[in-house]
């Protein structure tokens, strides 16, 4: 007889919505100075609030500056929270695995 065991993760994924400006040498080739809407997925210890300084450092490392982000939701164990949107599901999984993921939405704002 097999029994499924659920393993509690020691972290949450916070989802932020907002925008940021691409920097001079953006790794994906976005034009410098253009503001883009984006969604940030950030893994963090369960129950801890997001650190704004750490977020800004992460965004700069990813090629973004002047970010304006608002917390949208905190996900604990909901890999399917985004329905059929594959890009958002993949970003959630990448944040769990790598610590963070950014989804750039459409054309410059």
Image: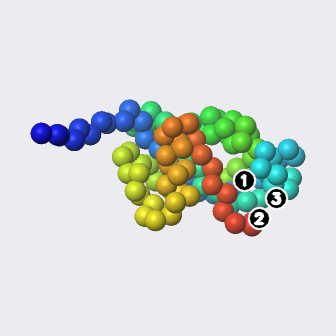
- Disc nearer the start of the sequence (2/3): 3
User: Image point 30% across, 36% down: which residue?
Assistant: 7
The answer to whether 36 is drawn above or below residue 50 in the figure is below
The answer to whether 83 is drawn above or below residue 63 in the figure is below
Q: Which residue lies furthest to the front in this view?
A: 1
- What distance separates the C-alpha of mark 2 from that of mark 3? 6 Å
Are there few (<14), some (14-19), or many (20+) residues within 10 Å of tag 2?
Answer: some
- Disc nearer the start of the sequence (1/3): 1
- What distance separates the C-alpha of mark 2 from that of mark 1? 10 Å
* Image position of 98 (left or right of 28): left
Visual colour scheme? rainbow
Residues under numbered marks 2 and 3 in contact, where contact means CB atoms less than 8 Å apart: yes
Q: Residue 20 carries which label?
A: 1
- Discs 2/1, front: 2
- What distance separates the C-alpha of mark 1 from that of mark 3? 8 Å
* Residue ID for mark 2: 108
Q: Which mark is residue 34?
A: 3
Between 54 and 63, the residue placed more toward the observer is 63
- Disc nearer the start of the sequence (2/1): 1
Residues under numbered marks 1 and 3 in contact, where contact means CB atoms less than 8 Å apart: no
Query: SS class of the residue under badge 1?
Result: strand
Q: Could you tell me which quadrant the C terminus lies in?
A: bottom right
User: Image point 49% across, 55% down: which residue?
Assistant: 89
Q: Which residue lies furthest to the left in this view?
A: 1
User: Image point 81% across, 55% down: which residue?
Assistant: 30
């Amino acid at each position: 007889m097999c029994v499924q065991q659920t393993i509690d993760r020691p972290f949450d994924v916070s989802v932020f919505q907002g925008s940021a400006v691409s920097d001079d040498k953006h790794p994906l080739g976005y034009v410098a100075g253009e503001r883009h809407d984006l969604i940030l997925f950030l893994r963090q210890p369960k129950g801890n609030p997001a650190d704004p300084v750490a977020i800004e450092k992460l965004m700069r490392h990813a090629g973004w500056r002047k970010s304006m982000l608002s917390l949208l939701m905190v996900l604990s164990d909901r890999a399917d929270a985004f329905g059929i949107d594959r890009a958002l599901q993949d970003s959630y999984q990448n944040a769990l695995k790598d610590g963070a993921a950014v989804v750039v939405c459409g054309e410059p704002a």
